[in-house]
Image: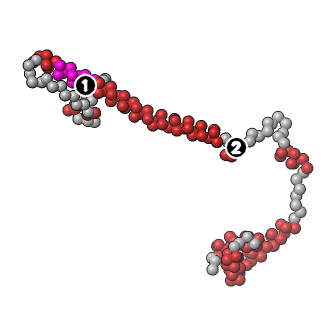
Amino acid sequence: MINHHRAGHLLSSYLDGELLPEEATAVQGHLLECAACRAAFERLRATKGLLGELPVAEPPVEFWSTVREPGPGRPPAARLPWPGSIPRRRVAWGAAAALAVGLVLALTPVIKGTVDRLHAAEIGVDLYVREHAFGMSIEPLADRGFLGVVVGDADLVLAGEPSRAGGSPP
């Protein structure tokens, strides 16, 4: 069974024969039981009958010419390109350009960070080598002839940056 509220919304569609068979049967059953909906249905049927008796208004003859043709001093409306009218090559070039821009934007920080690390490594190794070379010149016979270089990101200090206290990573 259909509720009163839903039946009221379906009355116009029922009158026009637009409902599915099971909906039409439900509305018809509700109309047999509900006097308020039956009265609303009869008013709606009478209103639609009166509207059907009205003459159809015809637009003036010049109406269509003003709709189809642009007025004086007005350029014709530009047609919007539809997806089918845009050449596939343009779409492919646009997608390729968008991908290239996206890659550049995504990789710029990575490349810049790598260059900064390489620059810092050069400075770090240079300072390490200088320190050991200086130490060897002071004590030439000391057992410090091996020069081992181990550089990690935590050991690096970029030129112009203050050194971190304790040498701990940020």
| Residue at x-position 10% and y-position 17% | 140
Secondary structure beneath dot 2 equals helix
Q: Residues within 10 Å of mark 1 (few under 14, many from 20)?
A: some
Q: Find residue 25 and report its horizontal and vertical position in percent.
A: 69, 79
The magenta span reads 123-133
- The residue singled out by tag 1 in the image is 125
Does residue 132 show up magenta in the picture? yes
- Magenta part, dominant SS: helix
**Amino acid, disc 2:** Ser
Residue 127 location, quadrant: top left
Whether residue 161 is visible, yes or no, is no
Q: CA distance from mark 2 to mark 1?
A: 61 Å
Q: Residue furthest right?
A: 61
Q: Which mark is residue 29?
A: none
- Residue nearer the viewer, 20 or 38: 20
52 or 23, nearer to the observer: 23
Quarter in which the N terminus is drawn: bottom right
Kind of residue at badge 1? Val
Is label 1 in a helix, a strand or a loop? helix
Q: Which residue is mark 2?
A: 85
